[in-house]
Image (tube, rainbow, N blue to C red):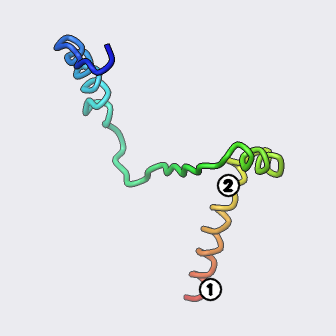
Amino acid sequence: MKGELPSPNEIASIRSFYLLCTSPVRMLGRMSNDRDRVISITLSEQEWQAFVARQPQPVVWLLERIRDEVKAQTQQSQSAA
């Protein structure tokens, strides 16, 4: 089966699923430019284990560091004005 093209029935199923997922109804609501951002970092298992040993909640730690940087930048901009 590897390398075979999908049948017309399979394509229709995929198309209907795709259209269902991207339907304009799904996009209704408050329009905004706000978006969630995702950061992906590749670490070896050894690096990950060493990091988690020091920071048991790595996501919280990263969020706090990023927010600290944003806060410091805002404060610098305000004091310069």
Mark 2 residue type = Leu
> Residue 50 at x, y = what percent?
79, 49
Tell me the residue that label 2 is attached to: 62
Most distant residue in the bottom direction: 80
Most distant residue in the left direction: 8
Closer to the camera, 54 or 28?
Answer: 54
> Would residue 79 appear left or right of 14 to someone viewing this image?
right
Residue at 32% from the left image edge and 27% from the top image edge: 21
Most distant residue in the front direction: 2
Closer to the camera, 72 or 38?
Answer: 38
Residue at 23% from the left image edge and 17% from the top image edge: 6
Rate crowding at label 2 as few (under 14), some (14 to 19) or many (20 or more) other CA atoms within 10 Å: few
Any mark on residue 48, and which? none
> Residue 1 at x, y = what percent?
31, 13
Q: Which part of the image, by quadrant, shows the C terminus?
A: bottom right
Rate crowding at label 1 as few (under 14), some (14 to 19) or many (20 or more) other CA atoms within 10 Å: few
> Would residue 81 appear left or right of 50 to someone viewing this image?
left
Q: CA distance from mark 2 to mark 1?
A: 26 Å
Q: Closer to the camera: disc 2 or disc 1?
A: 2
> Would residue 29 appear left or right of 45 to someone viewing this image?
left
Residue 46, relative to residue 81: is it above or below? above
Any mark on residue 79, and which? 1
- Name which quarter of the figure residue 26 lies in: top left
> Residue 67 at x, y = what percent?
64, 61
